[in-house]
Amino acid sequence: MSKATLNTDTVHRVGFLDKASLHIPILRILQADGTTYETAVLPVIDEALATKIYDTCVFTRVLDERMLGAQRQGRISFYMTCTGEEAAIVGSVAALDAEDVILAQYREHAALRYRGFTTEQFMNQMFSNEKDLGKGRQMPIHYGCAALNYQTISSPLATQIPQATGVGYSLKMQGKRNVAVCYFGEGAASEGDFHAGLNMAAVLKCPVIFFCRNNGYAISTPTEEQFAGNGIASRGVGYGMHTIRVDGNDMLAVLAATQQARAYAIEHNAPVLIEAMTYRLGAHSSSDDPSGYRSKEEEAKWQQHDPVKRFKLWLINKGWLAEADDAQRYEKYREEVLAAVKVAEKLPIPMLDEIIEDVYDKPTPALKKQLSELKEHIKKYPQSYPKSAGRL
Amino acid sequence: MAEMNMLQAVNEALSIAMQSDERMVVFGEDVGHFGGVFRATSGLQEKFGRSRCFNTPLTEQGIAGFANGLASNGMTAVAEIQFADYIFPAFDQIVNESAKFRYRSGNEFNVGSLVFRTPYGGGIAGGHYHSQSPEAYFTQTPGLKVVVPRNPAQAKGLLLASIRDKNPVVFFEPKRLYRASVGEVPAGDYEIELGKAEVVREGKDITLVAWGAQMEIIEKAADMAAKEGISCEIIDLRTLAPWDVDTVADSVKKTGRLLINHEAPLTGGFAGEIAATIQQECFLYLESPISRVCGLDTPYPLVHEKEYMPDALKTFEAIKASVNF
């Protein structure tokens, strides 16, 4: 046992610690009316940053609304919204450097947008067309973009958590003053990979920001059936890392916490855990119907805590946004999204040859043979494989 | 008899098993009040209480380890892994623990009263991570039984037999058929013996073997072949481990030809095991090479799903090639 990590004081009567032994406050800076608490220390933010944050939120709202609609119309096969969690996602990404590497779960497309992913790029992925960076291989919303330092989404939960630890270690070894940023939900934090990733990051001193979106539900499972402890934050303390819990619907609190977490992670080569308390206002995905497991009243209550609205009120108070311009901002993005949908859905799917690319660095002889046999087969029955028969 | 889909049949089997075995518990992600993302456990919590049907935290390795613990101590554990694509965090618990519990302890302990139910397979636009067919990873693990039903009546009888079998079973449910496959299901409690294949159609020119969702594919291919005057004998393997060598070998001795179809990639797939065994058992009876119609050796692709699938047309072509060899 090392004195450096363990307390050495002793007691002589049995006494147990419990979850209340650890007091974890919630950082909140912005009030519901858009004013800040008197004693609050604000993040570093100017009008340009604030506008970019808000603009990203508006785009994301529009994208979610339109693409969920497109899914309902059968134009895309699947969709996931991040409605209600925009402050957690955009507030955190806005604190980062563009070279910081993001490893997301799947509900963080707002962060990708903030980084510069274009409307066309979103559409190309969702419509699995020949311009999709992922070559049409994954379901809609599984984005990734090397140029924007945003690793491609993998559906299995929590696999990105220990990977972020490895990315953080590599950034340290490469002498970069950057961090890895890992997003995940409170449900994913039950996976073994969560424990492995956080423990290793603390022990190996990796500059990683572990950002937990505690949004109340893992599909249908509420947090009270997910963990019995003091949220996710208490675990960060247990792993020996700097930890903070923030109001995830408070853009300024998230931004402030992430800015300081990043500075600490780089200065000390150490991980930080941020637990953002928020609420998944939408369904888990387009395949899910929350009416089977939660009430309309509960959803309505959380509608009152809309993070975008709260931030908007602050912007208006600051004189950085005019209410009159807001509708136009939404309308602009609605038109942009709709136009991009119309283009993307008409583009063909990737060439059949792509099916064997990237399995390995180059296709094996066996794969080439399988492709060649497949092409011969399709030529024989072109009407049965209409998407690829015309472009062999 | 009542007409129902495969989900309803699974649900009914679970309900009957829980009724007849008060030590049986059903658990997994979202399986409690919500009834699972596919609703296979719908109503079980209401009927049997929260202590017997419940949500677990989101951890497949935890679910599998917990199941091993329950089964090792006198309970009947039926765990749901939400998608077979997500079974891999549980791989260690299933392969190193469930499968070897009895052997390593000299039968001091066992986890025989244990079933892992998990939806598998493609054809639902699910991409890499909602489409895989990982059965062959488990068939290479002695100590596990691996079962795959093809329709609602089979699902009910095979699941009831799996739950009562004295060995851990990985029960793969073809999710493409969950609602699509509707059929007459016998009422009440019945079991279909594990380890027994079923000849679902007799024929004389070639034997076709598959399991689960691919059964309807080979049946369709056999219909196409029939129009060309080729008579196919169709076998549903049903249990992959241990598999029914005799039923397949007897058929091949009669037809002289064998085709195996599975959705999983060709290389290392279970068809290879069947082919090797049958060429050993039936070498002098074979009139053409054993044919495999399988998925490509690539991850399961989203946009080229149709091209990837070992469909009826590919099977039909392979039947003709085998007969005309």
Image: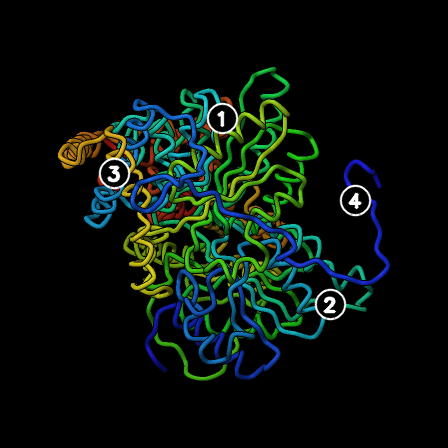
Residue B215 appears anywhere in the view:
yes
Q: The residue tagged with tag 3: helix, strand or loop? A: helix
- Marks 1 and 3 sit apart, C-alpha to C-alpha, by 24 Å
Mark toward the viewer: 4 or 1: 4
Please give the residue where the numbered disc 1 appears in the rendered image. Answer: A101
Q: Chain of mark 1?
A: A
Q: Are marks 1 and 3 on the same chain?
A: yes
Q: Position of residue B104 (x, y in %)?
A: 80, 59
Q: Cβ–Cβ below 8 Å for labels 2 and 1?
A: no
Q: Cβ–Cβ below 8 Å for labels 2 and 3?
A: no
Numbered circle sitting on residue A83? none
Sort mark 2 into few (<14), some (14-19) or many (20+) by Cα contacts within 10 Å: many
Please give the residue where the numbered disc 3 appears in the rendered image. Answer: A63
Please give the residue where the numbered disc 2 appears in the rendered image. Answer: B110
The first of marks 3 and 4 along the sequence is 4
Q: Cβ–Cβ below 8 Å for labels 1 and 3?
A: no
> Disc 2 residue type?
Asn
> Disc 3 residue type?
Leu
Q: Are marks 4 and 1 on the same chain?
A: yes
Q: Cβ–Cβ below 8 Å for labels 4 and 1?
A: no
Picture layout, residue B186 above or below residue A81: below
